[in-house]
Amino acid sequence: MSEPRRERSTEAFFGRRSGKTLRPMQRSIRDELLPLLKLDLTTPAPADLRSLFTAEVEVVRMEIGFGGGEHLLHEASRCPKSGFIGVEPFVNSMAKLVVDLHENPLQNISLYDDDATQVLDWLPAASLDGIDLFYPDPWPKKKHWKRRFVSQKNLDRFARVLKSGSRFRFASDIDTYVNWTLQHCRAHDEFEWQAETSADWHTPYEAWPGTRYEQKAHREGRIGAYLTFLRR
């Protein structure tokens, strides 16, 4: 049985929504657990995002497009005092993560399975302690560049929800998207690039676990760039 067709969001920065049909066990666990972890955007966001988590957390971060979930799970495990909002519209990736959480529960993760801009617009101002966007779809064709997640409008969204002094981190193995992101962030008044030498953007982040996509890129001869921007 195939996944039901889902309506495209008004601002979709992703491609297809699903891959192979989920196995019955995946579907069952997803249908049981995801509603318990999913943000309810039909209600107002809490003024204090720490209340979204059953764990007692001190800060709240967001990862947009977590893919296989390697980094999200790694960070949530090693930073139990941080709450994480994970956004991923791809059905199979979300199901994989939910199954992982079923097997190894974490109380500091909330999820959303649609367009990240919906979450960004729902969040209160100055409520996040960090945003991660790792290996997003590069939309390499020029006619598709408008679908790249990094844009003036989305950087405005980031600036609104990020606390002063927090960080937006971006990783990609596609040179044109790295340059695109540098140009957009350096042109934005609220973001400052945190790099002094080439090693600063060629060195992965602290405790970086790597991702399956990154491993594939390395096999194909592409090396990632790791950019960090400070929210002024």
Image (tube, grey):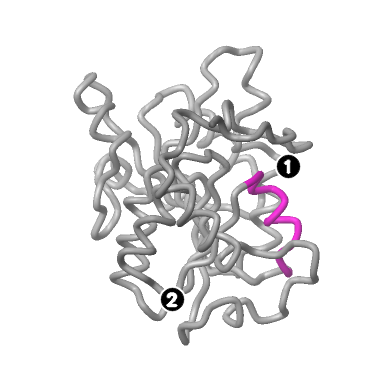
Residue 130 coordinates in the image, percent (x, y):
51, 63
Of the image marks 2 and 1, the number of the one nearer the N terminus: 2
Q: Provide the residue span drawn in magenta.
A: 114-124
Q: What's the mark number on residue 106? A: none
Secondary element type, mark 2: loop
Q: Residue furthest left?
A: 219
Front one among 76 and 204: 76
Q: Which image quadrant is residue 41 in?
A: bottom right
Secondary element type, mark 1: helix
Query: Considering only vertical position in the picture, is 60 above or below 56?
Result: above
What secondary structure do most residues of the magenta stretch adopt?
helix
Q: What's the mark number on residue 153? A: 1
- Tell me if residue 105 is in the magenta stretch: no
Give the quarter of the figure containing the N terminus. top right
Pointers 2 and 1 in contact (CB under 8 A)? no
Neighbour class for label 1 at 10 Å: few (<14), some, many (≥20)?
A: few
Residue 232 seen: no
Front one among 113 and 146: 113
Q: Which image quadrant is residue 10 in?
A: top right
Residue 145 coordinates in the image, percent (x, y):
62, 21
Front one among 63 and 33: 33
Look at discs 2 and 1 and give the one toward the viewer: 2
Query: Considering only vertical position in the picture, is 206 above or below 43?
Result: above
Callout 2 amino acid: Gln
Give the labeled residue for mark 2. 107
Q: CA distance from mark 2 to mark 1?
A: 32 Å
